[in-house]
Image (tube, helix red, strand yellow):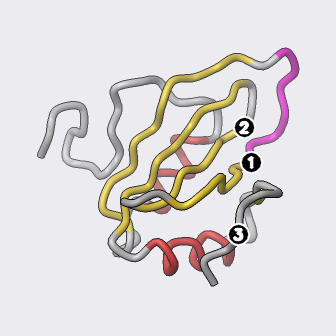
Amino acid sequence: MMRHRKRSKIKLQHGLIAGLESFLQKIELWPEIDAINPGRIKPKRKGSPFAIRIQYCTKSGLKCIAHSQGVQEVFFVSSDPKKLEEHLKKMSKHKILYNKKYESLT
């Protein structure tokens, strides 16, 4: 395994906002996810319940934004981004939002 991963698909170079760690641990076992790369945390003035927003598709997967007491980019590396998007949509416990400019892969 690569540095910062500790036998996991989640790269732990940066900290994680509240709610993101448990969310990522639940989905890291999905076969369509090859790696999860959280970015830097940007503080927000006002906290909110955990939610994740799909921003757009990248060459290697999906870029999402996680919200709670801060904002954090999360990159999902996937060999099948369409299947990953569908799987994320099916999650009912966590709030999955979509960027207004984002066009679904489905």
Q: Nearer the viewer, mark 3 or mark 2?
A: 3
Magenta part, dominant SS: loop
The residue shown at (77%, 54%) is: 99
Amino acid on which disc 3 is placed: Glu
The residue shown at (44%, 55%) is: 76
Which callout, 2 or 1, points at the residue further toward the start of the chain? 1
Q: Which mark is residue 51?
A: 1
Q: Is residue 91 magenta?
A: no
Cα gap from disc 3 to disc 2, whole angstroms: 21 Å
Label 1 secondary element? strand
Q: Nearer the viewer, residue 81 or 87?
A: 81
* Circles 2 and 1: CB atoms closer than 8 Å: yes
The residue to which callout 3 is attached is: 103
- Location of residue 63 in the rendering, given as x and y in whole percent from the top left corner: 54, 51
Amino acid on which disc 2 is placed: His
- Location of residue 74 in the rendering, given as x and y in whole percent from the top left corner: 52, 43
Asked whether, in this view, residue 94 is left or right of residue 105, the answer is right
Which callout, 1 or 3, points at the residue further toward the start of the chain? 1
Amino acid on which disc 1 is placed: Ala
- The region drawn magenta spans 45-50
- Location of residue 93 in the rendering, given as x and y in whole percent from the top left corner: 73, 64
Most extreme residue toward the bottom is 106
Cα gap from disc 1 to disc 3, whole angstroms: 19 Å
Q: Is residue 79 above or below residue 57?
A: below
Q: Which mark is residue 67?
A: 2
